[in-house]
Image (tube, grey):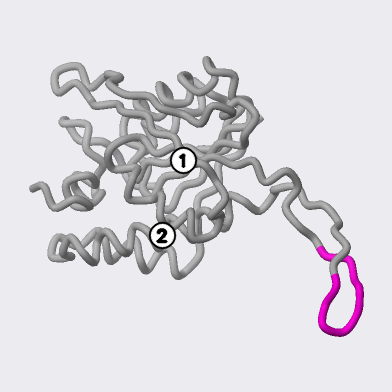
Amino acid sequence: MSKVIIMDHPLIQHKIGYIRRIDTGTKDFRQTVSEIAMLICYEATRNLKLMDVEIETPICKTTVKELKGRKLAIVPILRAGLGMVDGMLTLIPTAKVGHIGLYRDPETHKPVEYYCKLPADCADREVFVVDPMLATGGSAAAAIQMLKDKGCKKIHFLCIIAAPEGLAVLKESHPDVDIYIGAMDEKLNENAYIVPGLGDAGDRIFGTK
């Protein structure tokens, strides 16, 4: 069974409070989302495998730990997920980056695919799917299914804010995927936006509203 980790770190909670504010501008919003992504990534990579490597320090030879394999991929769900990529690459700069494009049909609130480009060896990589908001769960579940259809087996999902409805959908659709959440909110409203949430993450990251 997968695990669901809801972050309780003071820095993450402080930064999420900042991006919720209606008067936080695009530049600060974008920068803070990147910082939150880096902090969540730190927790999500806690169980990566290590191996022993012999090196030489300025003093003597010794054995140190290094990541085993290092085959990681970050896959943002476009477009808001792009805001989380740079922060994660700061921690894992050797990761490859794929992209999955989904939009939510305004009538049905169901995800519609419009783009998918993944590393050629994505099936051999540990994949971190990222999207700031887990609302209905439809886009996240669809993106993860696309990855599974291409042979990916080790998949994690990272978001900044989640609604209980979206978490339930994702857990039911993909019980084998670990889920990392910055903050769990109250509910979805009639327009399938998270309450209290922070509005449209994509619009706020890219200044398109």
> Does 9 appear above or below 95?
below
Residue placed farthest to the left in the image? Answer: 209
Three-letter amino acid code of the residue under disc 1? Val
- For label 1, the residue is 97
Which of 150 and 13 lies nearest the eye of the viewer? 150
Inspect the magenta stretch and tell me whether residue 181 lies in it: no
Q: How far is disc 1 from disc 2 in space, using C-alphas?
A: 18 Å
- Helix or strand or loop: what does disc 1 sit on? strand
Instruction: From the top left corner, tell me how far across and down residue 104 is, in percent.
Output: 23, 25
- For label 2, the residue is 36
> Does 167 appear above or below 43?
above
Inspect the magenta stretch and tell me whether residue 62 lies in it: yes
- Helix or strand or loop: what does disc 2 sit on? helix
- Residue ID at (91%, 79%): 60
Instruction: From the top left corner, tell me how far across and down residue 87 is, in percent.
Output: 43, 58
Q: Which residues are magenta?
A: 56-64
Quarter occupied by the N terminus: top right
Residue placed farthest to the bottom in the image? Answer: 59
- Residue ID at (52%, 15%): 149
